[in-house]
Image: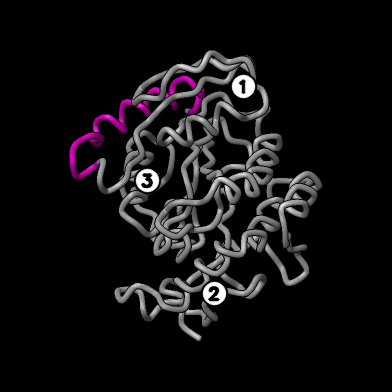
Amino acid sequence: MLAHPNTGQLFTSPVGPGTGWPDDPATPRTPVAADAAQVSALAGGAASVAELGARISVCRACPRLVSWREEVAHAKRRSFADQPYWGRPVPGWGSERPRLLIVGLAPAANGANRTGRMFTGDRSGDQLYAALYRAGLVNQPTSVDAADGLRANKIRIVAPVRCAPPGNSPTPAERETCWPWLDAEWRLVADHVRVVVALGGFAWQIALRLPGAAGTPTPRFGHGVVADLPSGVRLLGCYHPSQQNMFTGRLTPAMLDDVFGLARKQAGIR
């Protein structure tokens, strides 16, 4: 067992549900989805965001993804060799009544797969949370682990794939198996959401698939592109804050500020 870098509590790697990891929504009794049909049933039967997050966090429906996320949790990156890894699916993070929903891609193997929080512990997350802080959407500019005191200001961050995929590339079948989790999460928060920010082209396509988006003209994804959905929600495109995009200058902090400043204004977040 290894000590959590913030709390010092000892954990196995991967972390067992209900063992005390910060913000772990699950218990040893949380039902576990073992295949696509069970994902659909458990997602559809979740009565709250908290219950859904618990069920997401113990899912074992995709054998390749389960094997990979746990292999990474055992092997670890050298710089994190003294830490336990979450090594489980990553539930959405933030407000349960969000006015702004941010859609990403999938957890990073040594980022959210290590920390258990979306976009936390890697360089993409460093860029994203710094921008959210500048926009007044979180209370601090860094997100390093699930016990660091980060709080959301009426935002929620989700992903269409909840496990770290090998090569950052989930298969089409894995994407479809995971889809009911996001579909259910959207149905639980949709009445509150005014703006969706899609981080990248894949997230843009996923957002256009959400209930209430049917029949929307589908403008091509681009940074700053806007689509008004039939549900009244406004969809904003944003380049993904990946290392490659930031290092090459395709995406800059100022460009992130433009998107999230607009998103906050149009979502009516104070």
Q: Residues within 10 Å of mark 2 (few under 14, many from 20)?
A: some
Secondary structure at numbered mark 2: loop
> In this figure, which residue is indicated by the disc labeled 3?
129
Q: Which residues are magenta?
A: 246-269
Label 1 sits on residue? 213
Residue 187, by quadrant, is: top right
Residue 141 vs 83, above or below: the answer is above
Q: Residue furthest left?
A: 248
Q: Do labels 3 and 2 touch, CB within 8 Å?
A: no
* Residue 111 horizontal/vertical position (percent): 40, 60
- Identify the amino acid type marked 2: Pro
Secondary element under disc 1, as helix, strand or loop, is loop
Q: Earlier in the sequence, mark 3 or mark 2?
A: 2
Whether 100 is among the magenta residues is: no
Looking at the image, can residue 218 be seen? yes
**Residue 212 vs residue 133: left or right?**
right
